[in-house]
Image (cartoon, rainbow, N blue to C red):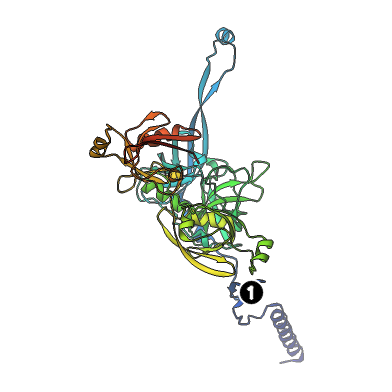
Amino acid sequence: MNKETFTTIVAVLASALVAFITAKAATPQQKAQQPVTSYSVDGNPYRTVNLTETDYPDLTYAAESSADAVVYVKVTVKTTQEYDLPPMFRYFFGLPESQDYEQQGSGSGVIIRPDGYIVTNNHVVQGATKIEVTLNNNKSYEARVIGTDPATDVALIKIEAEGLPIVPFGDSDQLRLGEWVLAIGSPLGEQLKGTITAGIVSAKGRSLPNYSGEFKIESFIQTDAAVNPGNSGGALVNKKGELVGINTAIVSQTRAYTGYSFAVPSNIVKKIVGDLIDFGSVKRAKLGVAMSPVTEKIAEEMKLSSLDGVYINEVTKGGAADKAGIREGDILVNLGGTPITTPNSLQAKVNSYHPGDKAGVTVVRKGKTIDLQVEFQGTADNTGTVADDGSVAFYGGKLVQAGKEELARLGLQKGVKIASAGSGALAEAGASDGFIILYVNDQPVSTPQEVVEAAKKSRRTVYIEGVSPSGKTGYFGFAKE
């Protein structure tokens, strides 16, 4: 080996050594990281984080497993255009008094059962005379409405098909702020059906402005996944491919996505559609309290360690909360094992129960923690629901057909018996068990359903006349909720 060759080899080896050292310095050292737990200011742990794992999820499984179960929904709505014109003008130009025409609308839906049950928004199918569902494979079916719930903007429709792909329900209560989610639907029409966008859960328990309704949902999931008109009724799924919400609304001054979208939590949706399938209507539970947030002043006066919970301003006499032992001035902090932090979270939890369900409830009273059990009652919204024993729900009470012997004893030919006055509006009006209803708002009634229908026709007050078990004529009235 000559001197020139030796010098060349040494130079090459030196260059390789420098490159190795440089690369080693540029590459982060993979040290074994211990799981780290971070804590909030009040000492509660947020979560345990393994720093060796990436926090950015792979969303391909969630997208691929869910996309085929999200459908395009096209609706036809008939509307009437009335012409406010003088008769002579209409006659001269050959114009009718009014004209019917059809409008087309669209949205999305989520298949939840292989036999064709699909969840969508009430506002998507409201007033529709025809509903057409198109699957991701471009097959189309005519759909029919099983039931709707305007208060939560949830509707259930069905197509005649079998073996369909589904999106399984997830637990929306387990969603965490910052968790990745996908929005799947048909924004801006059929051409973009099956569109998937990603975002995070940016807030929970949101209420929306100008969203009216007696049982309005004030616990929306807020995300920054892009949602536009046409996404309504589509799926919000977690990284496991589970349904955690139904995309419902955006807040925008331009009617297009501006960074905020809202979904009805899946736990509420699951309960609503279960009721629609099993009962044909929604059976809502009622706690019977008026509440407000816990303020700093209340927390200071009651020596509370945080502002979590709700302050009970009023307890309805004879209601579920009253019977459970909840009192005015209590701080309700837990229901059914779920921590209650705001009035919205309490409302959402109550909405997950049925009348007759029981749950543990924890309140703070004069510095002491008290565990109670509540049995939920029904609401006036359950009026008309037929129970297993054949009785019909009526404003917190139960109605049955009066027996022939009972009618004969009272000298009556027909009537409806109050089997149980319960503890709602019916009982508060002075009704008693055994009372025979003969008239509702001056309209004679002979069946429980006739009582229900007559009451529904009233805009404000229900006025009832009848006979007590002793044969004494009586009457009472109550304002509709």
Q: Disc 1 marks which residue?
A: 43
Q: Is 17 or 301 nearer to us in this picture? A: 301
Can residue 34 be seen from the camera position used here? yes
**In the depicted structure, whether residue 103 falls above or below residue 133:** above
Can residue 138 be seen from the camera position used here? no
Q: Position of residue 291 (x, y in %)?
A: 58, 54
Q: How many marks?
A: 1
Disc 1 element: loop
Q: Is 354 or 267 nearer to us in this picture? A: 354
In the picture, residue 223 is in which quadrant?
bottom right
Q: Residues within 10 Å of mark 1 (few under 14, many from 20)?
A: few
Q: Position of residue 349 (x, y in %)?
A: 50, 57
Q: Is 53 or 322 nearer to us in this picture? A: 322
Q: Is 455 or 197 nearer to us in this picture? A: 455
Q: Position of residue 352 (x, y in %)?
A: 47, 55
Please report the residue visible at 30 percent of the width from the left and 39 percent of the height from the top: 401
Locate the N terminus and report the quarter of the image it occupies. Answer: bottom right
**In the depicted structure, whether residue 455 falls above or below residue 240:** above
Amino acid at the residue labelled 1: Gly
Q: Position of residue 386 (x, y in %)?
A: 34, 44
